[in-house]
Every structure is written in structure tokens, then in C-alpha cells.
Amino acid sequence: MVIAVLASLAAGVCFAVAGVMQQWAAAARPDAEAFTARLLGRLVRDPLWRCGIGLAVVAYGFQSLALAYGPLSLVQPLIVAELVFAVPLSAQLHRMRLGRREWLGTFAVASGLALALVSARPHGGDPRTAGAPAWLLTVGVVTAVVCAALATARRLSGPWRASATALAAGAVMGTQSVLLASTVDRLRYGLPTALAAWQTYALVATSVGGLLLIQSAFQQGPLAASMTVLDATEPVVAVTVGTLVFGEAVHTGWPLSVVTMAGLALVGAGIAGLDSSPVIAALHGRERGRG
């Protein structure tokens, strides 16, 4: 259990620094490149962005090590601590100080998400039980959420726009997590079995699409507006889709459901506080000026 805790915290720190590196590089790109392959093409040439991606791979290694020694209900909430490292580090790089509002917003998102995950504790499920109707419903709902989020982002600016784009990215990456679980399950029966399934190719498509959306969110606003929403949306969507498609179960009943909803409400309040913060808006202005 000690190894699981230390590896989870190490993953959180690595994810935090990786996110700061990627956002620093993406924020310098012009608005015209958002949602285009050109954005990824330019970022791939940036050494700092490549270091961020490399550090994210290291973080996934720590996460895998943590999961080998501890349950998901312990590992995932600890990794969420990346927000506590990432947001202050991003502000420090831009020579800005966070006030009480920004610190409270950051801790509200991190603690609220951890509280929701610990109380819900998703478990069980079998990827082999997923039927076509459940998959079609999932794809339809996620597509609708992504389109609505991106349409909303077009009407917003600053931190709010970055948050709306991050919402779309989180929905895609949450679905990607479920597709990854399905693909890994099929790989146990051999590579031909995995290659014969449409989920494998959907996994590749969602991975590329999710990466583009994440970098676009990083480009459009400060890290506090994008990473917080991304970290909140991805597990919520993954748990919801896992419950719908794989038959996973979550702990419900009094007082667990109330605690879960309270955690999600805390996440929403923290995100709203950060997005409406003058300090975060000024941080976005500095990033745009640097670009």
C-alpha cells in the first residue's frame, strides 16, 4: 500500500509538470491553429512539448505501478493531487501570485473530485457483456456532449472558452478509457481478436481526437481553466460509460450518494470560481501576450 501511495503521488507530480509544459507550448500558438492538425504538427516540433509528452508517459508508468499494488479507489484520488501542483506552478512561471480565491478553487476541484471518486468506488463489470445498443447510445450521447461543448466554446472567450473545450476533451478521453479497457480485454485472446474488433480502431481515433482537443484547450486559456475541467470530466464520463456499457456498479445509498453529489458540487463551484477569477483572466492575458 505504501508503494501504491508513493507511486500515485509521483504520477500526480509528473502529470502536473507534463501538463504545464504542454500548456506553455500550446498557449504560444495562434488562435487560427485551434482544432486543426497543424496545431499538433507545430507542437511536435517544440522540444518543450515533446518533453511534456515524455513526462506524461513516465506518469502513466507510475500510475500502472500504483495500480499493481493498490485499488483504483485509492490511486485515482491521489493522482488528482496533480492540480495542487500544476496550477501554482503555472502561475509561478508567469510570475503571478495566486490569492485566496484561486487556492480555494484549486483545492475545491481536487478535494471534491477525490471525495466523489472515493464515495462512488466503481467496481466490477465485464467488457465482454457490452452490446451494440449500449455502445450506440454511448457514442451518440458523447458525440452530442462534445458538439454542444464545442459550440458553446465558440461563443465564449478566455478561461470559460478553455473550460468548454476541456469539457469536450474530457468526454472524449473518458470514452477512450473505456475503449482501452475493451481493447486490452480482447488482447488477452490474441492480437487477431483485437484487430477484428471496431473498438480497437475507435480507440485510435478517440486518442488522436482527444489529444487535439486537449492541446486546443491548453491553447485557449490558462491551465487552471482547462486542466481542472479535464481532470473532473474524464473520470466522471469513464465511470458513467463503464456503468452503462460494462455493467460496472457504484456504491449508492445514504450517505454515499449524498457525499458523491456533494463532491461533484464542490468541483463545479471550484471551476466556476477559477474561471471567473480576475487573476486567472490576467494569467490568460500574459499567456496571449507571450504567444
Image: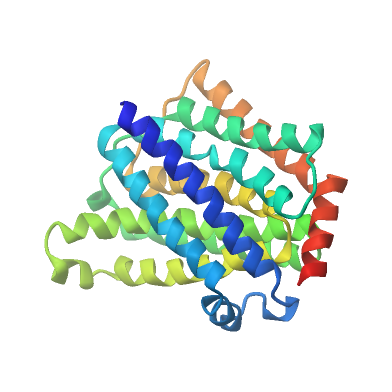
- Residue 134 image-quadrant placement: bottom left
**Against 269, is 188 above or below?**
below
Which one is nearer the viewer's eye here, 20 or 179?
A: 20
Q: How is the image coloured?
A: rainbow
Could you tell me if residue 145 is visible in this image? no
Q: Residue furthest top?
A: 254
Could you say which quadrant of the image residue 277 lies in? top right
x, y percent for residue 92: 72, 48
Q: Position of residue 221 (x, y in %)?
A: 73, 60
Q: Is residue 15 visible?
A: yes
Apparent side of residue 191 relative to residue 52 in the rendered image (left or right): left
- Residue nearest the observer in this picture, 248 or 61: 61
Left or right: where 247 falls relative to 83: left
> Which residue lies at the image location 81% right of the left edge and 36% below the top edge?
99
Residue at the image point whose x is 53% and y is 16% from the top: 255
Q: Residue at x 87, y 47 (%)?
A: 278
